[in-house]
Image (cartoon, helix red, strand yellow):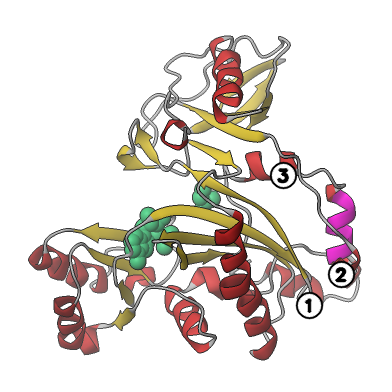
Amino acid sequence: MVKGIHDFFIADKELQKVPVIGPQKLAATLEGSKEFAKQFMFRHSIPTAEYFTATNENISDAFSFMERQKAPYVLKADGLAAGKGVLIIEDLVQAKEELKSMLAGKFGAASKKVVIEECLKGIELSTFVLTDGDSYLVLPEAKDYKRIGEKDTGLNTGGMGAVSPVPFASKEFLAKVEERIIKPTIEGLKKDSIPYTGFIFIGLMNVNGDPKVIEYNVRMGDPETEVVIPRLKSDFLEILEAVGKKNLKSKKSEFYDEIYTTVMVVSGGYPEEYKKNFEIQGLDQQFESVVFHAGTSLQQGKVITSGGRVLSVTSSGKDIKEALAKSYNTIKKIDFEGMYYRKDIGLDLI
Ligand code: AMP
Ligand code: GLY
């Protein structure tokens, strides 16, 4: 999307007929450039952390900005860096060194510019919006678990599990999110003449009851999707068609009230080096869960592992405990060599 696949469809007479859900190139810059996103938020008074955009030319001003911040120091490569471009560093001297190395090309062209941010303190969650560029639907919020280790330790991953709804996201808090963030985002896109068709994933920090934006992504999240979309009561295809026809106004969305959890089953070693091509046993049983396939492939009738994040096991229940028990029960029936999963998804929310 950042490279302009939607624009490619629009530019072609035949392909124009195909409705595309996903933003055009300019809109995708909200994820493709942290600086672009920050400027957008400040222009439209959307609450977010203070920032300074550092380049090799203004490094002494960048250092002064850092000196005015409290530890830890948040450094973000401006461009896309496969989810690895954000560094949070306790020590000021070390943070300055890191800034220099980022500007020198640590993340290639993505870190020629670095956005330095005020560090926000609070609990994170994600909200999701679908828009046809005019009206919007708010989808359920979710919380994901990014680190490989239990109690949020170890390396960052694409996501090890997720929960929706998020118990600490009260009605009052979500109303603030809609008024202060979602509406000004949609209005801001219109004012700036940035056409947007598709999902907006808003990463938020709950700072003492007030939402602040950490980042925009121009898509759904993984594994957030595996708990958000199953909650949808309305017909998903009809909603997507309405987006394609720019007629989303006519649609309402309804969601199940149950709690949904998903637990990611990964290859041993992930997110560092891991082995693939192990046969996955046990998939042909009855489960109380939906087992989404991610890093799998079919070879001679056998399902084998083909990636780091292999399966995402989603269940629902009247509370987090019940939903989790179903997911973990399902995982116990599945096996492949070296398989690993976190046993503490959602426990901090109980
Ligand atoms: P991002 O790629 O912008 O979502 O950043 C990755 C992670 O870094 C986020 O999920 C947060 O946990 C953390 N983070 C990013 N920006 C900030 C900030 N300004 N204050 C505190 N934590 C942050
Ligand atoms: N789970 C985070 C993401 O999809 O970016």
Which residue is identified by label 2?
Answer: 249
Identify the main secondary structure in magenta: helix
Is there CB contact under 8 Å for labels 1 and 2? Answer: yes
Q: Amino acid at mark 2?
A: Lys
**Element under disc 1:** loop
Where, quadrant-wise, is the N terminus in this rendering? bottom right
Q: Which residues are magenta?
A: 237-243
Camera-side residue of 45 and 72: 45
Report the residue that reaches farthest toward the left. Answer: 93
Which residue is identified by label 1?
Answer: 134
Which residue is identified by label 3?
Answer: 229
Residue 280 vs residue 80: left or right? right
Camera-side residue of 229 and 106: 229
Residue 349 vs residue 53: left or right? right
Spatial separation of the CA atoms under disc 1 and disc 2 = 8 Å
Query: Is tag 2's residue or tag 3's residue first in the polypeptide sequence?
Result: 3
Q: Amino acid at mark 3?
A: Ile
Residue 111 vs residue 284: left or right? left
Instruction: Identify the image quadrant of residue 95.
Output: bottom left
Q: Report crowding for label 1: few under 14, some 14 to 19, many 20 or more residues within 10 A (C-alpha).
A: some
